[in-house]
Structures are given as structure tokens and as C-alpha cells.
């Protein structure tokens, strides 16, 4: 059983992403080997999110040396949700898949991904 508690109040949101990204498989490779794990993060995305979290007021989600890869991804994803508070949840979820710039700057959308996330979220709440 995966412990989502490091995500604090974002635990169900993070878990819904994990369900649609990897079917909660902590070791799943994706995108031709460019993504890995529970939340299918690419190395560049992970590094950007870690850097942002460390340099902001989101220290409660900071990744520690002793964290497992899964815990680190959970914390980073929670930080991602936290820093986008005030933005429509649909856009936040879509930006996880498509990228922040793609959704917030270029206006790209993935309705199917949003609906899959909603269904996963409803199953766990």
C-alpha cells in the first residue's frame, strides 16, 4: 500500500493522478523510458519542481535525502497542486500531463485526461 500522507491535504488529488498515470505502479516506465514511477515524471520536470519547491514557501513538501523515489514524487506533486491554488482544478490536472506552459500559456487542453482524473478521484472519495 502506498503512503500518500506526505501529500497532506492533497493526498487524494495526488492519488487520483497516480491512478491514471501508472495505475499506482511505483516502478512503471513510460514515454519510451523518459518517465518513471508512480506519477510518471520526466527528469527535467522533476528537477524543475524540486527546485521550485526548495526556493519557495512550499518547504513542507521539500524532498529529503532519505525519501524514496515514490515519496519524493508524491511530495513534488502535492507541491505542484499547492502552488496552483486559485487556478481551475481542471487546468491544473491537464497541466500535469501536458505541461504548465502548454496549458496556461498556449491554451492546450486534454478533456479525456481530465475525465479520467475525475473518475479516479470519485472512486477514492
Image (cartoon, grey):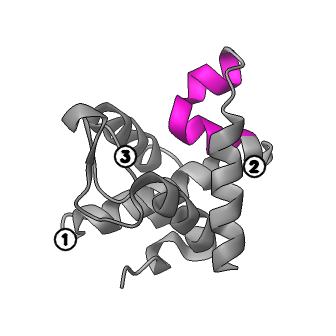
Expressed as whole percent of the image width and height from the top left, the position of residue 6 reads 45, 74
Residue designated by label 2: 89
Label ID, residue 91: none
- Mark closer to the observer (2, 1): 2
Expressed as whole percent of the image width and height from the top left, the position of residue 51 reads 37, 40
Residue at the spot 28% in from the left edge and 65% down from the top edge:
26
- Examine the structure image and report whether residue 19 is included in the region drawn in magenta: no
Disc 3 vs disc 1: Cβ atoms closer than 8 Å? no
> Is residue 119 left or right of 70 when viewed as pictured?
right
- Which is more N-terminal, label 3 or label 2? 3
Label 1 residue SS = loop
Marks 2 and 3, how far apart at CA: 21 Å
Q: Is residue 58 visible?
A: no
Marks 3 and 1, how far apart at CA: 15 Å
Residue at the spot 46% in from the left edge and 76% down from the top edge:
4
Residue designated by label 3: 50
Disc 2 vs disc 1: Cβ atoms closer than 8 Å? no
Tell me where the magenta segment starts and ends, as one range: 91-105
Residue at the spot 66% in from the left edge and 26% down from the top edge:
103
Q: Nearer the viewer, residue 54 or 81?
A: 81
Residue designated by label 1: 66
- Examine the structure image and report whether residue 95 is included in the region drawn in magenta: yes
81 relative to 10, above or below:
above
Marks 2 and 1, how far apart at CA: 31 Å
| SS majority, magenta | helix
Q: Nearer the viewer, residue 109 or 10?
A: 109
Expressed as whole percent of the image width and height from the top left, the position of residue 18 reads 46, 61
Amino acid at each position: 500500500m502506498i503512503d500518500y500522507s506526505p501529500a497532506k491535504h492533497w493526498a487524494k488529488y495526488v492519488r487520483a493522478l497516480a491512478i491514471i498515470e501508472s495505475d499506482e505502479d511505483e516502478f512503471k516506465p513510460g514515454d519510451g523510458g523518459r518517465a518513471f514511477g508512480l506519477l510518471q515524471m520526466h527528469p527535467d520536470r522533476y528537477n524543475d519542481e524540486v527546485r521550485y519547491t526548495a526556493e519557495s514557501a512550499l518547504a513542507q513538501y521539500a524532498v529529503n535525502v532519505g525519501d524514496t523515489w515514490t515519496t519524493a514524487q508524491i511530495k513534488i506533486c502535492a507541491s505542484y497542486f499547492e502552488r496552483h491554488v486559485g487556478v481551475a482544478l481542471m487546468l491544473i490536472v491537464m497541466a500535469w500531463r501536458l505541461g504548465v506552459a502548454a496549458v496556461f500559456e498556449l491554451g492546450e487542453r486534454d478533456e479525456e485526461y481530465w475525465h479520467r482524473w475525475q473518475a479516479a478521484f470519485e472512486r477514492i472519495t
